[in-house]
Amino acid sequence: MTSPTRAPQTLSMTQVLLCSAAIVTLSMGIRHGFGLWLQPVTMDRGWTRETFGLALAIQNLTWGLVGPFAGMLADRYGAFKVLVAGAVLYAAGLVLMALATSGLAFHGSAGLLIGMAQAGCTYAIVYGVIGRNVAPEKRSWAMGITAAAGSFGQFLMVPVESGLISAFGWQVALIVLGCSALAIVPLAFGLKEAPRSVATAEPQQSIGEAVREAFGYRSFQLLMAGYFVCGFQVVFIGVHMPSYLKDHGLSPQVATTALALIGLFNVFGTYAAGVLGQHLAKRHILATIYALRSVAIIAFLLLPLTPASVYAFSIAMGLLWLSTVPTTNAVVAQIFGVKHFSMLGGFVFLAHQVGSFLGVWMGGKLYDATGSYDVVWWIAVALGVFAALINLPVRETAITRGGAPVPA
């Protein structure tokens, strides 16, 4: 006799959103300021920009590669344990980043350790909890709220990090941030879910079946390609724009203000994307975001470079910065359901991080080779047009299994 299916006990939506938002504020806020360390670290250690850029490229690639496995563990054992492990790795990576005296040690700490940490305490993990505990009709909005929190973290943390570097030096600043990362541990208790019942009358999809289904689905492939472009653009700009501005004679305060403006206006952009995703076709929202990014970069490159033009560009990019995150993840949940959502979100994010790797590494590599960032800026423009076009054919309807659509 088959046991009746029991509905899993859900967490309070308010509790989930508050804890998710606070975790993402910390985890994303800390990393958004890494570009501020490029010049003090390279000047103090005598390294090239490529050395620093490669460390962050390794970080982004590691984040992407580990993400699907962190998602599998979160789907299977709950997000709480994964978040705690991620927080501990984050703290260790930041402290060792401050102590590294060789390029290899810097790549291991800033690259491998922090990349693994971010896989365990950012969007894919908390979005899995949101997907399981928030009603489908509110899911896009809830993901927008959490992404907006990550943007607020950038607005909040970038000036703090700049102040820490100025007041105490870049090494002490990293150690302080490492201690701050441990605050994720108590917040993770708010996302600790009750064990899920395995008793069910429905056939269960295995991890392998879920992966094969997703990678064989055309819309999933297109979403991954678009997210690749997102990673290339935002990480190149976030890491290399402070140095680009200084190379053109603008003060470090302009760069700090620019990154803070991106974070501030991203709060509005991501929230708006989450709200619009409940009413409009998400593929159209994504296509518009990528197209407008290219327009903003072209205007930035063609107009005279002044503090005013930098701030205008930062506001425009801020509105478009992470607005792809809730939209893309909401489409994945809409197509495949939430059973393996953290894992599938991790795979989509892997594509994002491959783009991030290339964006941050090519920024340093081509700068060292040509003395300019111009080539990479124009690559970012072309990729934006490409991403806008490939998102248009995405199908957002639930995939059919056994003759019936996947339940939300």
Image (spheres, grey):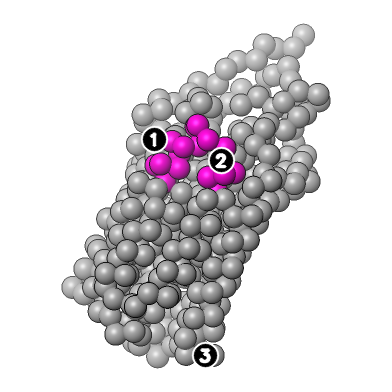
Answer whether labels 3 and 1 touch (C-beta < 8 Å): no
User: Residue 282 got which mark?
Assistant: 2
User: Does residue 187 appear in the picture of this structure?
Assistant: yes
Residue under the image location 37 percent in, 79 percent down:
243
Q: Secondary structure at mark 3?
A: helix
Say which amino acid is labelled 1. Answer: Leu
Residue at the extreme left of the image, as rendered: 167
Q: Which residues are magenta?
A: 270-286
Reading the image, the residue beneath label 1 is 17
Which of the two discs, 2 and 1, sits closer to the camera?
Answer: 2
In this rendering, the answer to whether 379 lies above or below 144 is below
User: Does residue 96 appear in the picture of this structure?
Assistant: no
Residue at the extreme top of the image, as rendered: 1
Q: CA distance from mark 2 to mark 1?
A: 22 Å
User: Residue 370 got which mark?
Assistant: 3
Say whether residue 283 is magenta: yes
Q: Position of residue 297 (x, y in %)?
A: 45, 68
Say which amino acid is labelled 3. Answer: Thr
Say few, some or many: other residues with alpha carbon within 10 Å of mark 1 (under 14 / 14 to 19 / 20 or more). Answer: many
In this rendering, the answer to whether 54 lies above or below 350 is below
Left or right, residue 348 beside residue 98: right
Task: Quadrant for residue 352, please give it.
Answer: bottom right
Say which amino acid is labelled 2. Answer: Lys
Camera-nearest residue between 64 and 320: 320
